[in-house]
Amino acid sequence: MAKAKTNKGLAVAASKPPVDIGISTADRKAIAEGLNALLADTYALYQKTHAFHWNVEGPMFQTLHLMFETHYNELWLATDLIAERIRSLGFAVRATYSELAKLSSIPESPGVPEATDMVRLLVEGHSAAARTARKVFPLAEKAGDESTVDVLTQRLQVHEKTAWMLRSLLA
């Protein structure tokens, strides 16, 4: 808490002002919980994509190595966008590995899969993240939370397009 005026030499903590952005506390909380799940999926997908970037081998090495790098950089930036939206709603971001792992719908991929399996696993991950984002959409729309709707729309576009591009490599 921030320090405010002193009372006979003692610092008195200033109370934090309430979050009053025109969305009820209950709606903000539900949206923030959904966004924390999206953050968990985004982070899991970031980690998986980065690991695949490091470990990909085979005839598609150059293409996949560069593509995965582009994807993990985009995902890393998205984690900040989502986390800051949660904070704007007045709630804490779930940020430990264990919290994120519990919330994520994207399983880890142990070992080093073959390149085509990496692509398949990333298609599944982007599809899962899109489904998670889609679950939050009605909550944000109902609450009139246009800022979250915008974030979700952006994330859906990225995940759906990335899944399509990755699927195209498997054709």
Image (cartoon, grey):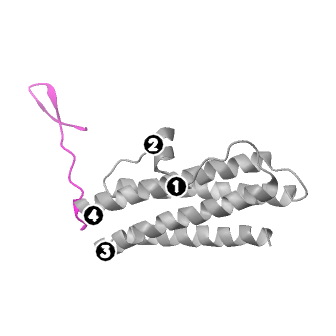
What is the number of the mark on residue 27?
4
Name the kind of residue labelled 1 in the image: Ser
Furthest toward the left, the residue is 8
Q: Is residue 99 above or below residue 46?
A: above
Magenta residue span: 1-25
Q: Label 1's element? A: loop
Magenta stretch contains residue 17:
yes
Front label number (1 vs 2): 1
Q: Earlier in the sequence, mark 1 or mark 4?
A: 4
Q: Label 4's element? A: helix
Disc 2 crowd, CA 10 A, few/some/many (<14, 14-19, 20+):
some
CA separation, marks 1 and 2?
12 Å
Q: In this view, does 88 lie to the left or right of 40?
A: left
Tell me which secondary structure the magenta stretch mostly adopts.
loop
Disc 3 crowd, CA 10 A, few/some/many (<14, 14-19, 20+):
few
Q: Earlier in the sequence, mark 3 or mark 2?
A: 2
Q: Earlier in the sequence, mark 3 or mark 4?
A: 4
